Amino acid sequence: MTAELLESWLRARSIARHLPQPVADRGGLRVDTAMPEELRRYVFAGPTPAITQLAQEIHEPYVFIKMCGPGARLQSLVPQRWQLQPAGYLMIKEPGRNPVPSLPPGYWLQVQTEAAVTTARIFTEDDTLAASGYAAEYENVFIFDRIATVPEHQHQGLGAAVMAALGTAQKSQAAQRVLVATEAGRGLYATIGWKVLSPFSTVTITPPF
């Protein structure tokens, strides 16, 4: 895992989500998200003693530490108050021919690009949102973000159709395609040519109830 690729992905992600750009912090990167359920996130390309020092200093919830590497390794670096979150996977796909979006009967596709962010949405015939996703290009990467299908519309190829539609917005055919997948998403992406580059692990302090 290269720190350069991780930084490019994170910068493109900030563009896709209209968030502040990451800044260098303790050998990693920090994004001041300033959202109700995420104050900020720290992202590291791999295990480092800086993670331990950082985690020891933080006692508040809604701060996330993320690292390329296995969850058990990240958890071993932080105090017990930090809780391991569901596994993620940093995945890549080599540039190449983009598949044509294909929809089952009864759906229609909308693709829009505004301020470097492309949005793809699939609707039913009565204009109910069934699936959506976002993409952004930054220097040497083209990222896919927040690919989601409404549960009752899953297993019909809508996720793959969203991905194909977003891919048509890629300008540089040399740009590396990157995304972070959930455990469930990893299987879908693998069927359409994506490969796991690294586990992407997260810890946070759970807020009191």
Image (cartoon, rainbow, N blue to C red):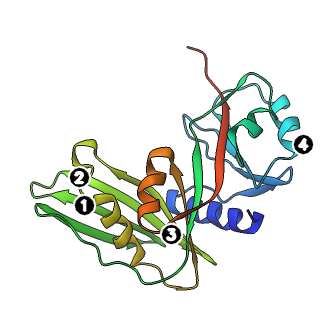
Residue occupying the point 86% across, 49% down: 26
Q: Which mark is residue 86?
A: none
Distance in Å between CA atoms under marks 3 and 4: 32 Å
Pair 2/4: label in front? 4
Q: Residue 136 carries which label?
A: 3
Residue at position x 30%, y 78% in the image: 100
Q: Name the residue under label 1.
A: 122
The answer to whether the residue labelled 3 contacts the one labelled 4, judged by CB atoms less than 8 Å apart, is no
Of the two numbered discs 3 and 2 on the same chain, state the one appearing first in sequence.
2
Q: Is residue 32 left or right of residue 194?
A: right
Q: Residues within 10 Å of mark 3 (few under 14, many from 20)?
A: many
Q: Are marks 2 and 1 in contact (CB under 8 Å)?
A: yes
The residues bearing labels 2 and 4 have C-alpha atoms spaced at a distance of 45 Å
Q: What residue type is labelled 2?
A: Leu
Q: Identify the mark nearer the N-term, 2 or 4.
A: 4
Q: Which of marks 1 and 3 is nearer the N terminus?
A: 1
The answer to whether mark 1 and mark 3 are in CB contact below 8 A is no
Contact, mark 2 vs mark 4 (Cβ under 8 Å): no
